């Protein structure tokens, strides 16, 4: 604990000096822009890392599932759960990335854009005041649900479709599953019966998978929007 100064007065608290002129202010803005750019790139790398994990999981489990008939047909279903978990992780990371991305866009649009090609229509926008408010009280710009939909549309829907195709091939092809034999007169019924997992009948497994993909379809098609400040990533 700091001791009081002579005379019983409390110690003086040192405060950071604010820019005193336009040159210092410009220098501060440049350094702040570089700092925000660094944070945005760091979160962008985290997004790519999560997507790479998901692709690795899909490739690894599909190679095991389709390489030998002894592999259980539930491996693609297990991969779907892992990819869904990674999608949720990436949606959370995307919310952080979106905050820094929008700050960078404020600089690029209202500062550097005006510097390189000034526009007078629309008047002066209070972007610095908006940025100051965001720095004092940072909040997420989008909800978790919207972030989930964006990442699903961008990357993960294709992984889920590949896993679905692999699972259908696994249960419908006798060469890819031990003990499976298709009746030419009832191919659909036999394929559904091959989808059974332990005590769960095949029709119940197929119904759950169809409901899951119906939810994915609704989420990917619902509320299509562009990214904040006219950026779509």
Image (cartoon, helix red, strand yellow):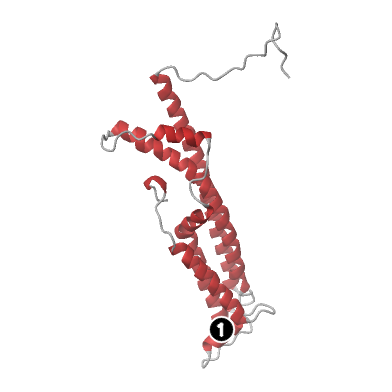
Q: Which residue is at 51% across, 38% downward?
A: 39
Quadrant the N terminus occupies: top right
Q: Is residue 73 left or right of residue 142?
A: right
* 89 over 205 or under it: above or below: above
- Residue positioned most to the bottom: 185
* 114 over 8 or under it: above or below: below
Q: Evaluate whether residue 162 shows in this view.
A: no
**Count of numbered badges drawn on the protein:** 1
Q: Evaluate whether residue 134 shows in this view.
A: yes
Q: Position of residue 158 (x, y in %)?
A: 47, 64
Local SS, label 1:
helix
Q: Which residue is at 46% across, 56% downward?
A: 150
- Mark 1 crowd level (few <14, some 14–19, many ≥20, 10 Å Cα): many
Q: Which residue is at 59% across, 87% downward?
A: 181
- Residue positioned most to the front: 8
* 233 over 162 or under it: above or below: above
The residue lying toward the viewer, choosing from 78 and 63, is: 78
Residue indicated by mark 1: 191
Q: Position of residue 71 (x, y in %)?
A: 63, 74
* 85 over 162 or under it: above or below: above
Q: Position of residue 88 (x, y in %)?
A: 57, 56
Q: Quadrant of residue 61?
A: bottom right
The residue lying toward the viewer, choosing from 144 and 177, is: 144
Q: Which residue is at 52% across, 71% downward?
A: 164
């Amino acid at each position: 604990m700091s001791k009081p100064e002579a005379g019983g007065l409390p110690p003086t608290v040192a405060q950071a000096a604010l820019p005193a002129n336009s040159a210092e202010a410009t220098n501060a803005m440049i350094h702040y822009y570089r700092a925000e750019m660094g944070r945005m790139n760091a979160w962008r790398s985290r997004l790519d890392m999560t997507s790479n994990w998901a692709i690795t999981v899909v490739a690894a489990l599909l190679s095991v599932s389709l390489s030998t008939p002894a592999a259980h047909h539930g491996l693609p279903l297990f991969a779907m759960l892992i990819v869904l978990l990674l999608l949720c992780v990436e949606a959370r990371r995307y919310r952080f990335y979106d905050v820094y991305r929008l700050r960078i866009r404020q600089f690029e649009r209202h500062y550097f854009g005006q510097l390189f090609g000034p526009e007078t229509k629309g008047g002066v926008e209070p972007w610095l005041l908006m940025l100051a408010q965001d720095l004092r009280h940072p909040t997420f710009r989008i909800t978790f649900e919207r972030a989930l939909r964006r990442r699903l549309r961008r990357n993960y829907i294709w992984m889920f479709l590949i896993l679905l195709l692999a699972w259908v091939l696994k249960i419908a092809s006798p060469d890819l599953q031990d003990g499976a034999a298709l009746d030419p007169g009832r191919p659909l019924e036999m394929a559904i019966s091959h989808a059974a997992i332990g005590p769960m009948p095949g029709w119940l497994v197929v119904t759950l998978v169809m409901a899951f993909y119906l939810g994915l379809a609704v989420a990917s098609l619902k509320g299509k929007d562009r990214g904040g400040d006219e950026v779509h990533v």
